[in-house]
Image (cartoon, rainbow, N blue to C red):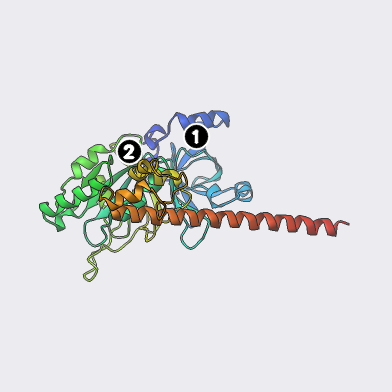
Amino acid sequence: MKNNSNKNKYTLEYLGYNEFFENFKKEQNLDYSNIGRVISEHKERYIVKTLNGDFEAEIVGNLIYTAKSRADFPAVGDWVGIAEYNEEKVLIYSVFPRKTILERSAVGKFGEKQIIATNLDFAFIVQSIDRDFSINRIERYLTICNNSKVTPIIVISKVDLISDEQLSGIMKSIEERIKGVLIFAISNETQAGLDELKNSIEKNKTYCLLGSSGVGKSTLINTILGKSLMETGSIGEITNRGKHVTSHRELIVLDEGGILIDNPGMREVGIADMQDGIKLSFEEIDQLSRNCRFKDCTHTHEKDCAVLEAVKNGELDNASYENYLKMEREKDHFESTELEKRRKGKDLARMIKKVKKIKNK
């Protein structure tokens, strides 16, 4: 629905628009008044932010009929071509090429991927310090970020629940396994670390918040905004976890510049065809593998395997090595399932073609 309070408040650059999207606009002969950015998606209902305000949006039939998969539909973060339908609604008739696509293996749908958000520059990987904390899970988020060429930033929340000494030990354990990634330790209760995190947010850049339910993503957004925009849940007495409230993806533009995308909590972070992401996330293993005797070494049983030797000698963290193997297995399973689905699709197409040929005789 149109929101007159937002009219003329932003420039397209303020919303993350740049030369990458401008080139496509020129190719399609689009006017600035005919483009917008998808800021919300809920059960195939969209809100698009434009220079003239926020509008409800629907997809035109042609876009639906030509879509080959769910990935061809708009997602939060997309720039889209729009046409006015009425004073409160617009029609989406094209989706701009995506600069980056953050995705994971779709839950319960083997061989399929789910888009988390598009056109991101950075991703805050939020992990609370309580029982949800897991470096293995951080490495999973790190892998989907690296595979999408989205710069990861680790945010450890609820640090007021532990002592400074405990926090120091946890930070050291993260840095030993994950190198070269910026880390913030914050508390929404005491405000510790929040000024540093806020000051790191760059104007015209888009950030996505990733994490499980109850880690404090919505509370963090409210703190950054300085007002309660996102609904948050109370802490469960038994689980000591915040109750998950966010049910859909939403893009929020900060007054000081920068764009945040909140996401529902993820119970699973499935690995799809992410070979590049795995290599970047486990760079130490990738470097060691170059000294293995066999080029196709799986690092599980082969003779003269440099990776196994490093694990044996304590030079490579065993937990990280096991996590690497698990993700490699998931990647291989996804790729084999995807290949099987493609084969079945081709077989079905050939059968339909054969039946039509028989009927036409």
Percent position (x, y) of residue 262? Answer: 35, 50
Residue under pointer 1: 33
Q: Nearer the viewer, residue 314 or 59?
A: 314
Residue 44 can be seen, yes or no: no
Residue under pointer 2: 258
Q: Residue at x 55, y 47 (%)?
A: 72
- Check the image and report above or below for 43 versus 51: below
Mark 2: give few (<14), some (14-19) or many (20+) Cα within 10 Å: some
Mark 2 is on which residue type? Gly
Identify the secondary structure beneath mark 2: loop
- Tell me whether circle 1 and circle 2 mark residues in contact (CB < 8 Å): no
- Check the image and report above or below for 29 versus 54: above
Which label sits in the foreground, 1 or 2? 2
- Check the image and report above or below for 81 versus 247: above
Q: Residue 322: which quarter of the image?
A: bottom left
185 relative position to 205: left or right: left
Marks counted in the figure total 2
Percent position (x, y) of residue 220? Answer: 26, 50
Cα–Cα gap, marks 1 and 2: 22 Å
Q: Quadrant of the C terminus?
A: bottom right
Percent position (x, y) of residue 142? Answer: 35, 47
Mark 1 is on which residue type? Ser
Identify the secondary structure beneath mark 1: helix
